[in-house]
Image: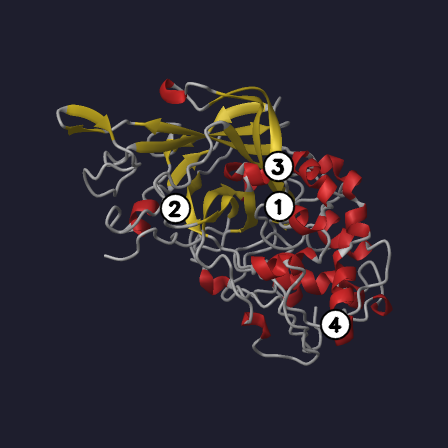
Amino acid sequence: MRTNRRQLGVSLIAGALAGLAALPAAASSHREAPFITRQPTVDATDFYMFRSYEANRSGYVTLIANYIPLQDPGAGPNYFAMDPDALYEIHIDNNSDAKEDLTFQFRFNNENRDTKLTVGGKQVSIPLVINGASDINTPGSAALNRRETYSINVVRGDRRTGTRQAVANAAGGGTTFDKPVDNIGNKSIADYASYAARHLYNVSIPGCAAPGRVFVGQRKDPFVVNLGETFDLINIKAPATAFDPNAERAAQDSLAGKNVTSIAMEVPIACLTNGAEPVVGGWTTASLRQGRVINPTPKSGAATKDGGAWTQVSRLGNPLVNEVVIGLKDKDQFNHSKPSGDGQFIDYVTNPTLPALVEVLFGSAGVKAPTNFPRNDLVTAFLTGVSGLNQPANVVASEMLRLNTATPAASGTQNRLGVIGGDNAGFPNGRRPGDDVVDIALRVVMGRLCHVNIGCAAKDAPAGLIDFTDGAYVDSTRFDNAFPYLRTPLAGSPNQ
């Protein structure tokens, strides 16, 4: 899709203006609902799904689900372990019925090795997750006072009643995997990149002819967003009406010094599709047990007693939908819901509020929201997929990230604007780390598709040809070209 080069230098934030899409289309999702703010270990921040572009891996799809937002690198002494009482899942719909057909389930376990030191003739437990016995350089190192491991199951059919089988280490056959300790600092871990790489496993997935790969561990947060000014009613100067060459890099990145925890899998394409339909949908969820009781004497046991059915508390496909799109009263409901029930939220997509807010705030600069209601262009882009790009046959409208696995990965340089930049391997055809989903979503929500007659006409979107930007720049050069693609996390103590 070609457009003119007029650009509105809107120094709006990745987070909020992405939300102007008023539908699942934009940015990362940090602390997006009232309940999840009290459960940060199960708070999903970003979900990625794309054809692998590492050399010689074109037959694979990479899935990345990030959790635990806003991690300060130096936040010891306990750092950011995953919740052993939670169930983390990545779901794939491969027949377009808005229900999962394939689910990868991750469960975590924390082993307290209870390292003791002799102090004044007494054995006393140390307070740290490392014991200083040696450099930490291998999985399950003896220098770890707390060893974090995980297991993976693949479920075919319904996530709770389908056929469940264990994913195994292709090298040794075991079903327990070590998660690297967070990047404490270079005195504890001299070469964190090499240490983390030793936790990348080739895995045998039941039902798959070829092995996949998995990595779970801390990474540098891949998203960029100016959180403070965005949620202070877009507290920035009015946008310029003329092109500003510096606008795309003008905003402060509040996540520049933050890490996240990534669950990353690389799965053969043939294992994800049903053999007939190349388009798959994906999303990630986290669930907790329905009942939780505080243990009054946790010294010899867990701090809580959990039981009952698994209850979903976090959901993320196209990111930011819950953070800035769903009304406050429905945010927890959305996190508990499944794509098959998305009809209850349809008004937030067809009659979005945030484009109207942008017009109120910046109308004097010539910004006008689209006038076509219902917003069928947005339904097409984000709830059904675009015909000829990533819309599966007989699709049931629902919020999830959709990827056409038949589209080859971009050869050479990726275009950060994905499809509207002429790169059909990018967002919204899946999502790669280097896709600037905020700029893409801004242009689409303000009516870019109307100017190519998808769901509306040019007259419905007077600002549809403006190249909106949020001022928070991201492209593929900020990431690695090999699995797991996201870069080494920032160290808690970076100096020698």
Return the residue found at the far left. 121
Disc 1 and disc 4: Cα gap in Å? 30 Å
SS at mark 4 in the image: loop
Who comes first in sequence, dot 2 or dot 1?
Answer: 1
- Residue plotted at (78% across, 65% down): 360
Question: In the image, what residue type sits under mark 3?
Answer: Phe
- Compared with residue 80, is residue 239 higher up or lower down, i.e. above or below? below
Residue 282 in picture, x, y percent from top left: 62, 42
Give the SS element for disc 3: loop
Residue 27 rendering spot, x and y as whole percentages: 60, 55
- The residue indicated by pointer 3 is 35
- For disc 2, the marked residue is 75
> Which mark sits nearer the N-terminus, 4 or 2?
2
Residue linked to disc 4: 465
Tag 1, which secondary structure? loop
Q: Amino acid at mark 2?
A: Ala
> Mark 4 and mark 1 in contact (Cβ < 8 Å)?
no
- Earlier in the chain: of badge 3 and badge 4, it is 3
